[in-house]
Image (cartoon, grey):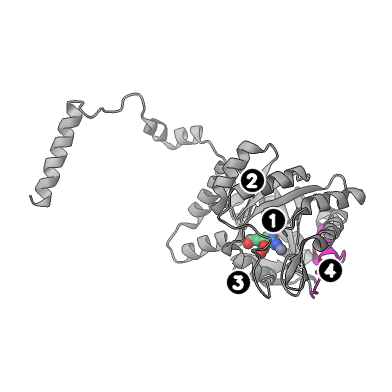
Amino acid sequence: MPSYTLYRWRATNVRELLRTRTVPIPTGDRPRRLRANPHLRELVRETRLHPAQLVAPIFVVSGRGRREDIRSLKGHARLSPDLAVAEAERLAGLGVGGVLLFGIPDSKDGRGEGAADETGPVPETLRRLKAAKLPLALAADVCLCEYTTHGHCGVLDGDRIDNDATLPLLADAAIAYAEAGADVVAPSAMMDGQVAALRAGLDAAGFHGTAIIAYASKHASVLYGPFREAAGSTPGFGDRKSYQMDPANGREAMRELDLDASEGADILMVKPAITSLDLLAQARQRFDVPLAAYQVSGEAAMIEAAAERGWIDRRGAVLESLTSIARAGAHVIVTYFAADAAAWLNER
Ligand code: PBG
Ligand code: ZN
C-alpha cells in the first residue's frame, strides 16, 4: 500500500475505534484543562523561584578598581573588594538572597596559608560588605585549592592529599572569614571531618553564630572546568578523585550528607546541580535542614555556549534549569545566573 493510503486507512480506523469507544476517550482525567491559559497555569504552578533563594558567586582579588573578565564565565569577573561591594549592591537591588565569595590571592604556597590571611581579598571584601549593611547573606567558600601552588584542596604528603593535616588550615580560614563578617562559611574541600573541624574551631573562637553550609555531596565532575580557570585552581598533577566523590555513587552521597548533618552542618549542599537531581530528591525526604544546590560553572557554560550559537533560548534554559533544581528539592540555589534570573523573576 502507498504510504498516503496507509495513513488514510489508519486515521479512519482510529476514528472508528474512538467513535465506537473501543478505545476509551478520557472523560474525568484531562490534565490539559489546567493548562488552558496562563492564569490557570500560574494558579497551579507547584514550584516558584524567588530571587531571595538565589546566591551569586563572586570572585575577589586584591587591589582597587581592579576588574579582570573571566573568559570561561560570561558576565563574571575577578573583582577587587571595592568593585565586589558595588556588584553586591547591584545584586541586593535585584533582591538576590546572598553572595558566596571565592578568593584569588596574589601569591600561593604549598600549604595554602593565604586562605586564612585576614588581609586577603575575602576578609577584606567581607569587612566592606558588613559595613555596607546590604540585605544579603554573606557566605565565603572555605578551601585551599585557590591558595596552593599545586592546586589541590588539601596539603600534600608526597603526592597524597593529607586529610587530617588539612583540617586545622580549613578551620583557621573559616575563623578568619567569620571574624571578618561572614554569616556562613562553606567548606568545599571534601576532607573527611571538615564540618566537625570548622564547627569546633568556630565555637572555640567564639563564633557560635556562624553557620556552615556544607558542600556535602560533591562529585569529581568535569563541570568545574570554567571555575578552575577563573580561580587558577586546576590541580598541577593528578585529579581530585581521591577526595571528591565518584559521580556514579548515590548511596555514598547520602552517607556524606548524613555525616555532614551529624557533624553540625546547618545547610547541606549538593553539586553539580543538574547531574544530582536524584540526590536532591532523596535528600529532601531524608533531612529537615535546608538543602542547597550549586549550579556549577560548567552547567552555566553549557547554557551560555548553546545560547551564543542560537541553539537554545538563554532565558528559558536558565529559568527551566533553576526551576527543575528547586523542584527536585533544593531550597537555596547557588548560580552564576543569579542577577539575570532575579531580574527576570522581578519582571513577572
Ligand atoms: C573549591 C571549589 C570548586 C568549586 C566550588 N568550590 C572547584 C573544585 O572543586 O574544583 C566549583 C564551582 C564551579 O565549578 O562553579 N574547592
Ligand atoms: Zn578546593
Which callout, 4 or 2, points at the residue further toward the start of the chain? 4
Q: Which residue is mark 3?
A: 71
Question: Residue 124: where, in percent of width, then height?
Answer: 84, 63
Which callout, 4 or 1, points at the residue further toward the start of the chain? 1
Question: Residue 143: where, in percent of width, then height?
Answer: 75, 62
Q: Are marks 1 and 2 in contact (CB under 8 Å)?
A: no
State whether residue 320 appears in this view.
yes
Which callout, 1 or 2, points at the residue further toward the start of the chain? 1
Instruction: Tell me if mark 2 has few (under 14), some (14-19) or many (20+) residues whose alpha carbon lies within 10 angstroms of its own.
Output: some
Q: Closer to the camera, 262 or 65?
A: 262
Spatial CA distance of label 3 from label 2 is: 35 Å
Q: Amino acid at mark 1?
A: Arg
Q: Which residue is mark 2?
A: 254
**Residue that appears at 64% across and 71% down:** 229
Q: Which residues are magenta?
A: 107-127
Q: Which residue is mark 1?
A: 90
Spatial CA distance of label 1 from label 2 is: 37 Å
Q: Are marks 4 and 1 in contact (CB under 8 Å)?
A: no
Q: Residue furthest top?
A: 28
Residue at mark 1: C-beta within 8 A of ligand 1? no
In the rendered image, the vertical position of residue 27 relative to residue 1, given as above or below = above
Q: Amino acid at mark 2?
A: Met
